[in-house]
Image (spheres, helix red, strand yellow):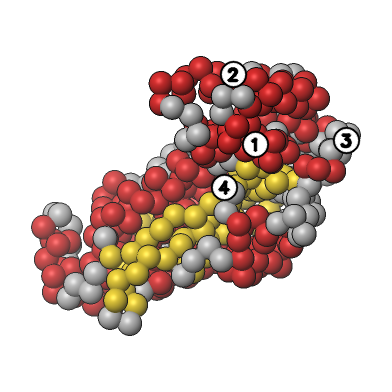
Amino acid sequence: MTDTSMTLIELLQKHDEGDFLRAVTEAVLQTLMEHDVEGLIGAGRYERGDGRQTWRNGYRDRELKTRMGALNLRVPKLRQGSYFSGFLEPRRTSEKALVAVIQEAWIGGVSTRKVDDLVQAMGLSGISKSTVSKLCKDIDDRVQEFLDRPLAGEWPYLWLDATYLKVRQGGRIISVAAIIAVAVNTDGRREIIGLKIGPSEAETFWTDFLRSLKGRGLDGVKLVISDAHTGLKAAIARVFDASWQRCRVHWMRNALAHVPKGQHTVVAAAIRQAFTQPDQKGAIEIWRHVADQLRARWPKLASLMDESEADVLAYMAFPAQHRTKLHSTNPLERLNKEVKRRADVVGIFPNEDSIIRLIGAVLFEQNDDWQSQHRYMMVEAFSQIDAVQTDPLLSITTQAA
């Protein structure tokens, strides 16, 4: 109580009436957040106690729009878990619209005057060229800080995928690969940990990207989930000492291509029997049995099953509590759809920097949303990973890739 009173007295001395109300509101909201965080931690600042649950981990700046103007708040961060106050809106609709319009105009090469007209048409105040430049620079700085942030701890699971976007280059319109990496740490939290733009999904491109992730601190990777792209598979083997899971959804599409359409349901049901087994040994037995049953009628499908057995069933060697989220790249597919939805507004990007700005901002917002949600995976099950004896055939090698 004394600290709060002293803060208000200092504000009275330093601010006139106009700034005072805003400053007092900032101080009160900041105090509320600090009090909430103390309850989550189980101890006050610099206080030691047996009931402590976690530790502070700095702050992140957040602007809150009010009738008194913009309030500059510092939201406390926790070393384990997350905190987001109820009075803070994740994103204001008007702020989203303004930033989207300015980004689209900036990327599309729209003149400053037209940007101003667009903003005023939305019922907002006009915006100058310097303001547009400052806002875009702020977006670039925040996105780059997010994409280059250090990665602490261990990340047992890593998902990799690419989506293609159109960009102008040398007077031509070409497609470039935007590769995205998502990982889960041992706290059960899912995070977007990387984005890179390149001309193709060649092995050297993927290798450079994966090494950059390791350089930022990505460690403890046990399983990598991706599509069966040759360059990606070889890069994974070169950079990580980990098992590789071939996306089960993509594999099933490839497998059913060897079967008449009228038989898709029956064949798919037969193959899926392997995925419902309680352990890896049972899954492998059912897989081989089904392959032998299908061999006489569809030899190409049976051969595909023989060749890809280890790749498709790799996730079965990991804790049962995690398996429903490990067998495919579906978590990344949904993220890619959101990326494409935003990118379609722009259509053709003028350069790769503009892709990083817009797509990076989308990923930044999505990652923030994930941190305010429940844990993505059960924490207790991570201790079972090292206890599971993985079949050496499930760990890809550089020679095999």
Question: Which numbered circle lies on residue 389?
Answer: 3
Residue type indicated by callout 1: Ser
Residue type indicated by callout 4: Asp
Mark 1: few/some/many CA within 10 Å (<14, 14-19, 20+) = some
Which residue shows up at 81% across the image and 43% down it? 393
Question: Which numbered circle lies on residue 303?
Answer: 1
- The extreme front residue here reads 296
- The extreme bottom residue here reads 170
Judging depth in this view, the residue of 384 and 80 nearest the camera is 384
Residue picked out by circle 2: 270
Quadrant of the image containing the N terminus: top right
Of mark 3 and mark 4, the one earlier in the sequence is 4
User: Mark 2 and mark 3: span between their CA atoms?
Assistant: 27 Å
Q: Dot 1 lies on which element?
A: helix
Of mark 3 and mark 1, the one earlier in the sequence is 1
Residue type indicated by callout 3: Gln
Mark 4: few/some/many CA within 10 Å (<14, 14-19, 20+) = many
Q: Dot 4 lies on which element?
A: loop
Left/right placement of residue 220 relative to residue 267 reads: right
Which residue shows up at 47% across the image and 35% down it? 257
Of mark 2 and mark 3, the one earlier in the sequence is 2
User: Mark 4 and mark 2: span between their CA atoms?
Assistant: 22 Å
Of mark 4 and mark 2, the one earlier in the sequence is 4
Label 4 vs label 1, nearer the camera: 1
Label 3 vs label 4, nearer the camera: 4
User: Mark 1 and mark 2: span between their CA atoms?
Assistant: 16 Å
Of mark 1 and mark 2, the one earlier in the sequence is 2
Q: Report if the CB atoms under discs 3 and 1 are less than 8 Å apart.
A: no
